[in-house]
Amino acid sequence: MRKAAVAAVAAAAAVGVALLVRRQVRESKRWGRAAAVLRDLEERCAAPPARLRQVADAVAVEMHAGLASEGGSKLGMIISYVDSLPSGQEKGLFYALDLGGTNFRVLRVQLGGKEGRVVKQECEEISIPTHLMTGTSHELFDFIAAALAKFVASEGEDFHLPDGRQRELGFTFSFPVKQSSIASGTLIKWTKGFSIDGTVGEDVVAELSRALDCQGLDMKVTALVNDTIGTLAGGRYDDNDVVAAVILGTGTNAAYVERANAIPKWHGLLPKSGDMVINMEWGNFRSTHLPLTEFDQALDAESLNPGEQIYEKLISGMYLGEIVRRVLLKMTQEASLFGDDIPPKLKIPFILTTPHMSMMHHDRSPDLRTVGAEMRDILGIQSTSLKARRLVVAVCDIVAKRGARLAAAGILGILKKLGRDIPGSDKQRTVIAIDGGLYEHYTVFSETLESTLRDMLGEEVSSSVVIKLANDGSGIGAALLAAAHSQYLEAEEEEPL
């Protein structure tokens, strides 16, 4: 009897051990499959220096092509008609209107010339009611003009407008526009949730001016710009060596100062300054040298604009978190990363944003508790192992660093076009102004971008290339451009870019 019991216990123990071994083998295979997905991602996202140089060369080639003819390049290379940037000597009271999304901002600034600089500035943000985003053009611009009139009415004694002068406004309009002069441009299409048929093909400055007249507001729009050109203007005001501006936020774009005689498609008179600001619209860049994965291809195919904005879909804040979600979903499908069942929320596109990704990537706690909290709060995954959390961080690292390295290659392309990428005896200082939440708040991204650019330029050239964080280019930059293109400027006061 006792022998039978011992045998039963031994058999049960053997079964237990066998089950444990089987579970361990299954676990080992599971983690092996997850690791294989990670390895494949790492290989396909690889952006070694040789590939980055190919990307930079391709950017420079597309820049040349876009300057030669309209539609000749994947880059827009749009002539902005901004031929004079702020010099720092501007004086007076100037306004800015920044319309680029569901909110708009109005801003006023008192400039005090070389010594006083920005004497005082005030800003107000206003939400656009949802119904106006799909209403009529008149309704939208009347609402904006009424808010602007109210803001002007609150002008305090610290702001001074010389007698007999109109107030002047810089208008940041961050939607696709075909510009025909510094202060006119027709809307190509609405984006970002706006859909107002009556405005497409119309001059947005004329629409705003009509609404301002209806409010009895004596104000002239002297500059129509986008946020990237505003950033360039704000950067130049702070530092005379700024030659280009890059936006790295939800979206991405770049603008730079080009010699007007190097723009074959420019058929007008050469500006007195000899220079012209070019809006690159670089988000639409694409090249066979870009390291694309199955996740990027699927994201693009399912997007509202398949085949377009490929570069933007690799490097901007709108998409980085979504790429990570897609990778984690595959790991879950193939390796049960978060248990046997796929968490329902993990299937929801864009539920994992880039700010969430950044928080997880920057988690320095030994048990990666921030990663665990984000998985729970965003994706509804109540429990995650440390091993799974480490895999999540590794995915974030690969996706973010690929984006940052490719952004650095884009900047190198601009420097190549300007001839600022080669060692020279003059040691000319070159400054790139960068704005946007992705660059400002995602430390791993910004540090990777800067170190990659340094490595590719080499020690000698990189010692004279500076990347500066620019703040609020789309606001104060527009006011500064209004000042730089003021109707009251004497022709002889204009300075070259």
Image (cartoon, rainbow, N blue to C red):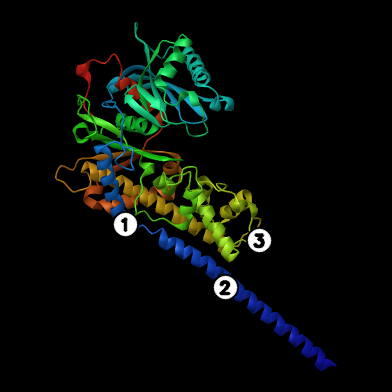
Q: Earlier in the sequence, mark 1 or mark 2?
A: 2
Q: As drawn, which residue projects farthest toward the left?
A: 425
Q: Earlier in the sequence, mark 3 or mark 2?
A: 2
Task: Report whether residue 257 is seen.
Answer: yes
Q: Earlier in the sequence, mark 1 or mark 3?
A: 1
Please identify the quadrant where the N terminus is shown. bottom right
Residue at figure coordinates x 52%, y 61% from the top left:
391
Q: Quadrant of residue 210?
A: top left
Locate residue 155 relative to residue 48 in the image: left or right: right
x, y (%) of residue 241? Answer: 25, 35
Crowding at label 3, few (<14), some or many (≥20) Cα neighbours within 10 Å?
few
Q: Amino acid at mark 2?
A: Ser
* Along the line of sight, the residue nearer the viewer: 474 or 33: 33
Give the residue number, with chain letter if any, for mark 3: 341
Image height of 72 relative to 14, above or below: above
Locate residue 456 relative to residue 32 in the image: left or right: left
x, y (%) of residue 110? Answer: 37, 18
* Along the line of sight, the residue nearer the viewer: 231 or 345: 345
Give the residue number, with chain letter if any, for mark 1: 51
Q: As drawn, which residue projects farthest toward the right?
A: 1
Q: Amino acid at mark 3?
A: Asp
Which element type, helix, strand or loop, lies under badge 1?
helix
Crowding at label 2, few (<14), some or many (≥20) Cα neighbours within 10 Å?
few
Q: Amino acid at mark 1?
A: Arg
x, y (%) of residue 15? Answer: 71, 82
* Along the line of sight, the residue nearer the viewer: 452 or 327: 327
Crowding at label 1, few (<14), some or many (≥20) Cα neighbours within 10 Å?
some
Give the residue number, with chain letter if any, for mark 2: 28
